[in-house]
Image: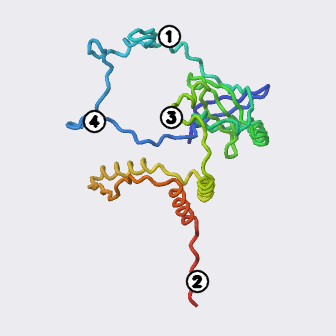
Amino acid sequence: MARPVWTGSIGFGLVNVPVRAFTAVRDHDVHFHQLDAKTGSRIRYRKVAEETGKEVEQDDIEMGFEVSRGKYVTFERKELEDLRPESTRTIEVTDFVALDDVDPIYYERTYWLAPGSDAAKRPYQLLLAAMEDRERVAIGTVTMRNKPSLVAVRPLDGVLAMSTMHFADEIVDRRDIDDLPTRRSKPAAKELRMATQLIDALTADWKPEQYDDTYADELRDRIERKERGDEIVEAESDEAPSKKVIDLAEALERSLGEASGKRRKPARKRRAS
């Protein structure tokens, strides 16, 4: 049974809705340890002083922020811990904004919000229905695990979800990336027509379950095979990378043909009488 990672309430105006937060995403990356290739022994990281080469005990380590090359402002761990804000028990909502106005680039990590008690079910459902009716997302702040976060509470799949968000100054301005185009050019009419036809041919309903992390799946499969002692033979690829530069219009035309072929359903064969 899932356990809540945070318990508190959504507060806006004089309204208070008790909620419990459950993580909505899970990490399925495959994690490895480093081993000595000769002995198979686990390789550990030790904290060693750069000047003496000696290992330093945890209690003798202080934190330093480099203000200039080789010059640090230092802090004791307790001093930094005392500076951390205490976790709060309320999502302080300050604004309700249009759902479409929030760009996905701001979303960080998402949590499902459940009613905090039986008594909270009615105000929870009321808030959910009102936000769905107005297509609004609640923007507020909360401190979880001693970390203050900007959050968005929004209707999602018939319940409320809370997403931690990046602050505006954490988003890299596109103007800071030199390789991004600074002005838009008008495409050729024929190429634009074929590009839009290709997009139309590949348009489908959003079904996230049809997309798999094939790399993680293959990696886990290989781990299981190695554990069983199976012999693993790498298949050689006969395909050499193509160096031919294909004309954009030609590439669009070929892609459109392939997409149309995939979407075209085969005709049913009639049974012989």
Residues at marks 3 and 1, CA–CA distance in whole angstroms = 42 Å
**Disc 3 vs disc 1: which is toward the camera?**
3
Viewer-proximal residue among 241 and 182? 182
Looking at numbered disc 1 in the image, what kind of residue is underneath it? Glu
**First reached walking from the N terminus: tag 3 or tag 4:** 4
Residues at marks 1 and 4, CA–CA distance in whole angstroms = 37 Å
Residue bearing mark 2: 270
**Disc 2 vs disc 4: which is toward the camera?**
2
Looking at numbered disc 2 in the image, what kind of residue is underneath it? Arg
Location of residue 123 with respect to 50 vertically, above or below: below
Residue bearing mark 4: 35
In the rendered image, residue 219, in percent from the top left (x then y), is placed at 38, 48
- Which quadrant: the N terminus? top right
Looking at numbered disc 4 in the image, what kind of residue is underneath it? Leu
Viewer-proximal residue among 188 and 227? 188
Q: Is mark 3 on a helix, strand or loop?
A: loop
In the rendered image, residue 79, in percent from the top left (x then y), is placed at 50, 10
Image quarter of residue 176: top right
* Label 3: few (<14), some (14–19) or many (≥20) C-alpha neighbours in 10 Å: few
In the rendered image, residue 174, in percent from the top left (x then y), is placed at 57, 31
Q: Is residue 31 left or right of residue 110?
A: left
Numbered mark located on residue 179 in the image: 3
Q: What element carries label 2?
A: loop
Image quarter of residue 230: bottom left
